[in-house]
Image (cartoon, rainbow, N blue to C red):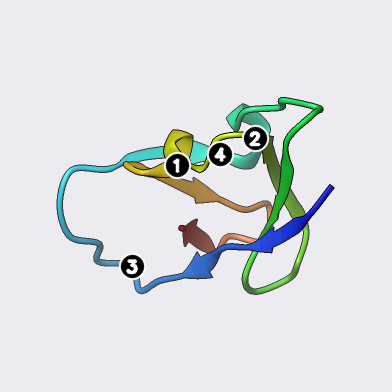
Amino acid sequence: MLAVPMRTFPGLFVGRRTVLRAEEAPRDLSGNRYVCGACEDELALASDPEVFRDVVVRCRCGEFNQL
């Protein structure tokens, strides 16, 4: 399993995005591990990075992350 850090971004994000809390993010156990760019806490497990194309994940630390 590969750990992929997600990028944190400023409060104003451009375009249409869906914001998910880390608790709501996908959990595909056979996929890659995505971690917060600020605190490196695990955000999601997904085998296909396309899942995160239009998604922003809010970490438990309060930071917003995107691929």
Q: CA distance from mark 3 to mark 1?
A: 18 Å
Res. 50 image quadrant: top left
Q: Earlier in the sequence, mark 3 or mark 1?
A: 3
Name the mark on residue 46: 2
Estimate how packed mark 4 is, as few (under 14), some (14 to 19) or many (20 or more) residues with alpha carbons within 10 Å: some
In the displayed structure, 66 sits above or below 32; it is below
User: Which residue in the protein does label 3 denote?
Assistant: 11
SS at circle 1: helix
**How far is disc 2 from disc 4 in space, using C-alphas?**
15 Å
The first of marks 3 and 2 along the sequence is 3
- Give yes or no for contact between labels 1 and 2 (Cβ–Cβ under 8 Å): yes
Query: The disc labelled 1 sits on which kind of residue?
Result: Phe
Q: Is residue 60 above or below residue 17?
A: below
Give the mark nearest the N terminus, 1 or 2: 2
Looking at the picture, tell me which residue is in the foreground, 36 or 47: 47
Q: Residue at x 53, y 50 (%)?
A: 58
Measure how far apart labels 4 and 3 are at the Cα level.
15 Å
Q: Amino acid at mark 3?
A: Gly
The image position of residue 35, as x and y in percent, is 70, 58
- 53 lies above or below 28: below
